[in-house]
Image (cartoon, coloured by chain):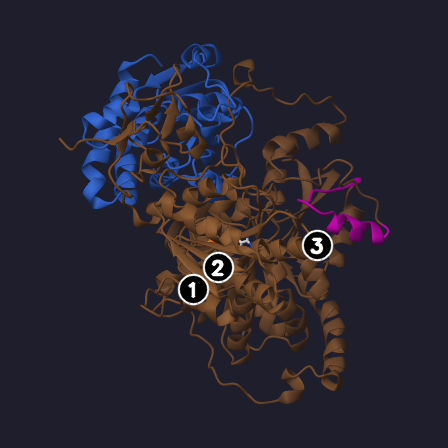
Amino acid sequence: MTTEIISVVFAGVGGQGILLASEVTARAAMAAGYDVKTNEVHGMAQRGGSVIAQVRFGTAVPGPLVPPGGARVLASLERIEALRYAEYLAPGGLAVVSTQAVIPVTVSSGQAVYPADAEARLRRVFPRLLLVDAVAEATKLGQARAANLVILGAVAGELPLPAEAWTEAIRACVKPQHLEANLKAFAVGRALAAGGRG
Amino acid sequence: MSERQLLSGNEAIARGAFEAGVTVACGYPGTPSTEILEAVVRFKDQIYCEWSPNEKVAFEVAVGASLAGARSIVTMKHVGLNVAADPLMTFSYIGAVGGFVACVADDPGMHSSQNEQDTRHFARFAKIPILEPADSQEAKDFLRLGLEISEAHRTPVILRTTTRVSHSRGLVTLGERQAPRVVGFERNPSRYVPIPVWGRKMRVRVEERIGEMAAAAAVSPANRIEWRDRALGIVAPGIAYAYVREAFPEASVLKLGWSWPFPDALIREVAAGVKRLLVVEELEPILEEHIRALGIACDGKNLVPTIGELSPARLLEIRAKVDGVPWTAPVPPAEAADLPARPPVLCPGCPHRGIFHALGKHDVIVTGDIGCYSLGVFAPLNRVDTILCMGGGITVAHGMEKAGEKRRLVGMVGDSTFFHSGITGLLDIVYNCGASVIIVVDNRTTAMTGHQDHPGTGRTLMGEPTVSVSIEEIGRACGVRNVATVYPYDLKQVNEVLKTALASQEPWLIVSRAPCPLHEKKPVGEPRQVRTEACRKCKLCFKLGCPAIEAGADGIPSVNRLLCAGCAMCAQVCPAHAFEPIAKT
Ligand SMILES: Cc1ncc(C[n+]2csc(CCOP(=O)(O)OP(=O)(O)O)c2C)c(N)n1
C-alpha cells in the first residue's frame, strides 16, 4: 500500500454520469483498504453546466479537495472540459479524455465559439493523453450511457487498486439490470488504456 | 471491528439522527442541505420525517416535537434560516425539552445560492450554540453531541455544515440506535409561554446559559489543541481545519468544532503557547474579531479572503503570505483561455421553456424567482428581470406596479415556491387591488434541488399518497377571478392565454402544468431531426436555448439525439417545418 495521497479529478457536463464514476472510484479505494474522501458538485451546476468530482485516497486523507497540480489522473467525459480543469493534473499525470463534444448553449446561441482545434489543444496541454471515443465504445455494447464506465476503465489502469476492488465497487453502485453492460464498458476502457498510448 | 461506510456529510447527519434516537425530522429542500432528509427517510420506520411547505413551518413542527419530549431535527440551507428566524429567536428563550438540532448548510462560494451569508452570525444573534463538523465522521458525531448539549443546556443548537462538508464523502464508523426518549408534554405555562412576565425571566436564563456553555465548550471533545511547532498557531473551525492541516502540517492548531459560545479558555491557551496566531475561517471574521476583543493580537482577514470559499489553492497562497515568500498563482494554460462558458441551462424538453418563449414576444417586466426557471435569465431566453428570494417573484411584481411602472408586470414562481411563500403574495395582490399576471410554472416537483415532493404532488416524503393541493383552487380562494391552466408544450395555447391576460386590467393566475421530464425519466415525445433541405437558416429555433439543438458550421441546426427529449417546441417555432420526428425503424 502506498502512503502518499492519490487524487483523481473527473470533469464533464452535468448529467454525463460523473457522480457515478467518482463513487465507483471511491468505493474501489475503500474496498482496497484505503481512507477515502470525495467531493461532488450537486444542485444548480448539474443542469447541463460544467462540473467536476474529486476523489482522494491514501492511508489518511485530510480534506476532500485536490490542490492544483495534485491529481494523478484527470478524466473528462467531454473534450474541452479537460482543458478547463487542466491545472488540477500533476506533472507527469495522465489525462483520459472522451472525444465527445457537448456544444454549450452559449455556442448555439452565437455568444461563444467551440474551439475547432480541441484535439490539437489537448495534445499540447497534456503530454500524457489518452483520447477515447467512449460514446462509440459504449454504443457498441448497446448502452450509450455507459460511456462514463469506459472512461473509468481507462482511469483504473493508472491507479494502484486491484481488479476485484473495482468489480465490487461497480456492483455496489450500478443497478442490476445495467450491471453487465457497465462491467463490459469498464473492461473495454481498461483494455484501451493498456493497449493505447499512455 | 464495527462497520464503516462511505457517507456524505448529509448522509452522516441522517445516520447520526438515527443512532441518537431522533424520532421527528422536518425540513425544506435547499442545496446543499437536501440530502439529509432524503437519507433520513431510509429510517422511516423509526423516524417520522416530512418535507414541510417552508423552513418556518418545518422549524415550528420540530419545536413542537421537542416540547413534547422527542429528539428532533430540522434541515435547511442557509437562507432557509432567514425564513425560520422568527421561531428560532424565541425558541432560544423557551428552550428545548427533547434535544433539538437545526441542521443548516451554508454555501461559501455560492455554488447554488443567491447569497453567501454566514450562519454563525445567527448562532450569536439567537444566543445558541453552533457546531461545525470538518468531515462526515464529525457530522455524525456532532449531531449526537448537539442533541446532548440541547438537552443539557435547554437550548436549540445549530449544526452548521458547508457545501464541502455536506457534499464530500468520507468513511464513517456506524453505531447502534439508542432508545428514543419518552414523549409526553408536561403543561407548565411559565416555561412555555413567553408573555412578557415570563419572557423576561427566560431572557435572564439565556444570558446565564452562555457562560455555562462557554465553559463546557472549552472542555468539549469537539474542540482540541494539536500542539506542534510553537512558531505558529492556527485557529481553524469546521472544514478550514482540513485545509489548514494539509497546508501547515507543522503548525500548532486549535481545532474548533463547537465554536460559539467562544471557548475563551482554549483560545487564551493556544495564544499563550505560540509566537504568532493566525485565524483561518471561511467567510466572516467572527472568531477573529472576538479574539482581538480578548486583547490577543492575531492575523486573519488581512491574509485570508472574506469572500468565497477556502480551498487547498487558497491555503497555499495564505501559506506563502505567512512565510513572506512571493506567491505565483497557478496559471491555466493558454489553450483554456477562450473556452466557451458552460453555465447551467434549462434541460432539453423542460416545460418552463414554453413560457419563456411566449414571454419573449412581449415588452413586459418579469419578476422571477428561485428554481430551475431562474435559468431563463440567460441568453437566448433573456426573460427574467429580477430575482429576490423565494416568493418574491409574486410580490416584487406588485410593488413595481404600485410604484407606477408603465409596462405590464408578470410574476413567475414554481409550484414548490408557490406553496413555500407564494400564496401570501397572491393574497396581497388581490386584497390590495393589484393587477399583475402571476404564472406558476408547475412541473409537479421541486426540480432544482433534485425532485422533492411538496403539497401539490400527492405524495409525502415517507411515500404515502396524500391530497394533491390545487394551485388553481388556492388562487380562486384568494379571490383571483381569472385563473387559467395551460400546457406549456402547446405554444399556441400559451401565447393566446398570455395575450388575453396581458390585455386585461386585472390580476391573473396562469398555471403552466407539465411534469418535469427529468423527473419522469421519460421523453416528452418522439425525438426530432432536421430536414436540412427545408431549413431557411432563420435561426428561430436557436432562440429556444435548447441544449439539444446544435449549430452546424453552415448555420443549419442539428438535433443531438442523445439529448433530445421530443418536446417538439422546435417544430412549432420553425416556419419551414424542418423539424420532423425521427421515423421509427
Ligand atoms: C428560502 C429558500 N429555501 C430553499 C431554497 C432552495 N431552492 C432553490 S429553488 C427551490 C425550489 C424550486 O422548486 P420550484 O419552485 O417547484 O421550481 P422548479 O425548480 O421545480 O422549477 C428551492 C427549494 C432557497 N433558494 N431559498
Q: Earlier in the sequence, mark 3 or mark 2?
A: 3
Image coordinates of residue B186 in percent, x first then y, are 55, 88
Q: Amino acid at mark 2?
A: Leu
Image coordinates of residue A144 in percent, x first then y, are 25, 31
Identify the residue at image location x=57%, y=20%: B332
Image coordinates of residue B497 in percent, x first then y, are 43, 51
Task: Please determine if labels 3 and 2 lie on a single subunit.
Answer: yes
Judge whether residue A3 can be spotted in this image.
no
Which numbered disc covers residue B403? 3
Can you say which quadrant of the picture contains the N terminus of chain B? bottom left
Does the Cβ of the disc 2 residue fall within 8 Å of ligand 1? no
Chain hosting mark 2: B
Q: Amino acid at mark 1?
A: Glu
Q: Hue of chain A?
A: blue
Q: Amino acid at mark 3?
A: Ala
A179 vs B64, nearest the viewer: B64
**Label 1, on which residue?**
B472
Which of the 4 quarters of the picture holds residue B465? bottom left
Tags 1 and 2 touching, CB below 8 Å: yes
B362 vs A61, nearest the viewer: B362
Magenta-colored stretch includes residue A197: no
Which numbered disc covers residue B509? 2
Does the Cβ of the disc 1 residue fall within 8 Å of ligand 1? no
Please, what secondary structure does the residue beneath circle 2 have? strand
Chain hosting mark 3: B
Find the magenta span and give its range.
B275-295
Can you say which quadrant of the picture contains the C terminus of chain B? top left
